[in-house]
Image: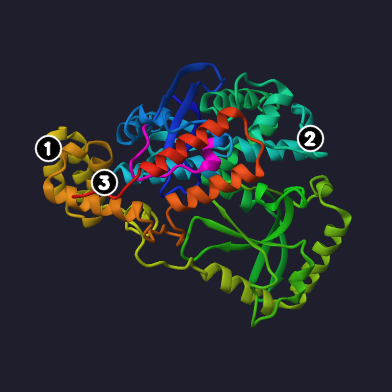
């Protein structure tokens, strides 16, 4: 049976590789949005994670609260089972831009399959935030739109307050889930629009929409389709929509579609020798936002006349400069992300090969072993990367189960974290540390008007930072 799983996470920070989930909430419904079950639990803070002060004063989850709850390992196994239940369509508000990838790294860190909830056993994903933008542009009467400083606000808490979707404090995971579910019910009342936007969240559906686009121009032996792209990343000034030329699929990242914005006058400054300085190419993964529409007059209404004129001028210029367009295509379809050395094992999801059958069996044996036997199972693992992740699982959650040699490795990791050594993720970004947290606390106290509760939460965090000392093997 197909079901929706509306879910939300509250986390220690924004780094998906190194931060962790502190609160998980979910409501499962049938496809008519009738509730079937709900889940809600808190997760204990890992000893090698420093919570962001900004996150702390936002979700109000303090150090005293995260001393209790499920271990991260037990919580991730539970979430993995929930979100991988056959037929589950997992969704939330801005989940594909944040929560979904956060879970992928959390699953990876805990030796759980990071991608199966996207495709296996009839599972899939959606995201209500980009749908909301689409409705605002083309079906605005479905809900009331909050305005902050005379601008439409797409923050869930503001939409919820404006439409009385849920009771309780925003950034509580269950409150946000209830608000997202109530919002989705309202959006789905326009069944034609709901059916259209839903179809983008499958690869086949997304590809079918691309294949229906009209061809815009031709150079040599290549014809190019054009589209309107609707994407939150385009921003308020662009009204979240822009005309674009489809350059094709990426050569390395096969799941990525590439779109060249056609509404920017700088495009006409591009040269064969330098195509990056004056072009804006958007990467759009199949079955993920943004949405696409044909460049029909009725859909162009959300683009200013000035931008429409630029769009027409750019098309003519590209037609007259096929060598530049060819250089743009060659550069962006071949471009690969920069590689970084010494990426931490927790952050190596995208740089490690997919596990083979033997490694998957090693992970399964580890999960199924008793706590006493897990340390022994680690020694038999055929992947050094998996061994390190498994040692960290025990060290964070069940340190008493580590062997002497494994304890020494884990303490080495802990000391690197506590002494602020340069630990980087797949983007080359450093792990958040106590020094950065103290700087953020000082900034917050100086620049923010804080409630008494927020002041207390920051005091708890400061005390926690002061108590953290390097450990001895």
Mark 3 or mark 2, earlier in chain: 2
In the image, what residue occupies the spot 40% across and 59% down?
424
Q: Which residue is mark 2?
A: 147
> Which residue position holds label 3?
392
Task: Determine contact: label 3, label 1, CB under 8 Å.
Answer: no
Task: Pick whichever, 249 or 403, lies toward us.
Answer: 403
- Distance, label 3 to label 1, CA atoms, is 15 Å
Say whether residue 336 is left or right of residue 44: right
SS state under label 2: strand
How far is disc 3 from disc 2 in space, using C-alphas? Answer: 46 Å
Q: Which coloring applies here?
A: rainbow
Horizontal and vertical percent for residue 306? 87, 59
* Residue furthest to the right: 305
Q: Which residues are magenta?
A: 44-56
Q: Residue at x 24, y 43 (%)?
A: 395
> In the picture, residue 266 is in which quadrant?
bottom right
**Residue 204 seen:** no
State how far apart marks 1 and 2 are (Cα).
57 Å
The residue singled out by tag 1 in the image is 373
């Amino acid at each position: 049976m197909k079901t929706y799983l509306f879910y939300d996470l509250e986390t220690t920070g924004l780094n998906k590789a190194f931060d962790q989930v502190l609160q998980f909430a979910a409501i499962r419904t049938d496809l008519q949005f009738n509730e079937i079950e709900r889940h809600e639990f808190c997760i204990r803070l890992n000893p090698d994670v420093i919570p962001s002060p900004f996150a702390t004063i936002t979700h109000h989850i303090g150090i005293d609260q995260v001393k209790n709850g499920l271990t991260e390992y037990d919580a991730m196994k539970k979430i993995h089972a929930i979100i991988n239940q056959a037929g589950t369509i997992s969704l939330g508000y801005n989940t594909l831009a944040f929560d979904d990838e956060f879970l992928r790294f959390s699953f990876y860190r805990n030796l759980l399959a990071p991608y199966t909830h996207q495709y296996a056993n009839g599972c899939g994903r959606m995201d209500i935030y980009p749908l909301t933008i689409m409705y605002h542009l083309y079906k605005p009467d479905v809900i009331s739109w909050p305005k902050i400083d005379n601008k439409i606000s797409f923050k869930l808490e503001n939409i919820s307050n404006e439409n009385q979707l849920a009771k309780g404090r925003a950034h509580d995971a269950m409150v946000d889930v209830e608000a997202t579910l109530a919002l989705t019910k309202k959006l789905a009342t326009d069944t034609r629009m709901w059916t259209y936007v839903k179809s983008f969240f499958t690869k086949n559906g997304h590809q079918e929409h691309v294949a229906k686009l009209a061809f815009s121009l031709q150079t040599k032996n290549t014809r190019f389709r054009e589209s309107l792209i609707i994407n939150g990343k385009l921003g308020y000034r662009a009204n979240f929509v822009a005309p674009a030329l489809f350059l094709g699929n990426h050569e390395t990242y096969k799941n990525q579609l590439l779109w060249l914005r056609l509404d920017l006058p700088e495009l006409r400054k591009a040269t064969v020798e330098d195509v990056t300085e004056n072009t804006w190419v958007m990467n759009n993964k199949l079955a993920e936002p943004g949405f696409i529409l044909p460049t029909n007059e009725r859909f162009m209404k959300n683009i200013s006349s000035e931008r429409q004129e630029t769009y027409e001028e750019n098309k003519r210029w590209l037609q007259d400069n096929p060598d530049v367009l060819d250089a743009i295509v060659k550069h962006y379809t071949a471009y690969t992300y920069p590689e970084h050395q010494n990426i931490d094992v927790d952050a190596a999801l995208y740089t490690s090969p997919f596990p083979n059958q033997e490694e998957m069996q090693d992970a399964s044996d580890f999960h199924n072993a008793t706590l006493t036997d897990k340390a022994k199972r680690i020694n038999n693992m055929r992947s050094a990367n998996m061994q390190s992740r498994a040692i960290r699982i025990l060290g964070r959650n069940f340190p008493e189960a580590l062997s002497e040699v494994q304890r020494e490795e884990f303490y080495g990791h802990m000391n690197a974290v506590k002494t602020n050594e340069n630990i980087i993720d797949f983007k080359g970004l450093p792990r958040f540390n106590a020094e950065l947290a103290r700087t953020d606390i000082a900034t917050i106290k100086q620049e923010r008007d804080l409630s008494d509760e927020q002041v207390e939460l920051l005091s708890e965090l400061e005390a926690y930072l002061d108590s953290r000392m390097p450990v001895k093997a």
